[in-house]
Amino acid sequence: MHLHFHILPRKEDDGQHIFPELIKNTENIEEVCNRLQIKQDNCAERSITLYTDGACSGNPGMGGWGAILIYQGKEKVVSGGEKETTNNRMELTAVIKGLEKIKGSHRVDVYSDSAYVINAFLQDWISSWRAKGWRTTKGEVQNLDLWKQLLSLCDKHQVIWHKVKGHADNEYNNRCDVLAVGEIEKMRKE
């Protein structure tokens, strides 16, 4: 769900006010926007933070993923792995599995160190892929099954994408990395 605001000129006394309690002085647009922001902030309890990471030992090779969801001060931790996969598949899977745990529709702030995942949204690679029939200059978009699954989940929520630096000072990203690597270690012991 995306929210767009358009401010259109109107007759002074037409009596048509969408937010009559907000529009007291139509000349002070900043004040109107600030009031709308306050209204939006009332939805903060429906906001979820999702940190994700994927790892692979060999590429392809054994892979793991980890995700941490934070909602109203509580955490939910999920992780898993595959015996034969790629790092990019694990990065995508981490986001998918995290979003799958969310019931209902929410604003979700997704934090990942994966340029592959984040840039697909922030640099709008996805629109280009769709327009070209899910093809790039090198052929079919890789991991198309996961991209389509992820896009379907994104349709349920208002997803905001954030790039974090990997293996740096981000506590949650580091914890997700430990989860992902831990899944690889579990498979090695089997």
Image (cartoon, rainbow, N blue to C red):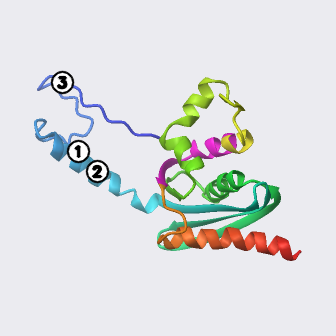
Residue located at (74% from left, 65% from top):
80
Look at label 2 and name its amino acid: Gln
For label 2, the residue is 37
Q: Residue at x 67, y 42 (%)?
A: 147
For marks 1 and 3, give the one nearer the viewer.
1
Q: CA distance from mark 2 to mark 1?
A: 6 Å
Identify residue for label 3. Answer: 10
Which mark is first along the chain, 3 or 1? Answer: 3
Tag on residue 33?
1
Q: State whether residue 24 is above or below residue 41.
A: above
Q: Nearer the viewer, residue 54 or 72?
A: 54
Secondary element type, mark 2? helix
Looking at the rendered structure, the secondary structure element under dot 1 is: helix
Across and down, in percent, residue 165 comes to 49, 61
Left or right: residue 20 compared with residue 158: left
Q: Is residue 21 above or below residue 71?
A: above
Q: Residue at x 47, y 72 (%)?
A: 169
Magenta region: 148-162
Q: Residues within 10 Å of mark 2 (few under 14, many from 20)?
A: few
Q: Label 1 is placed on what type of residue?
A: Cys
Q: Position of residue 160 (x, y in %)?
A: 47, 50
Q: Return the mark for residue 153.
A: none
Query: Is 128 a magenta residue?
Result: no
Q: Position of residue 53 (x, y in %)?
A: 62, 62
Contact? badges 2 and 1 (CB < 8 Å): yes
Residue 161 belongs to the span the image colors magenta:
yes
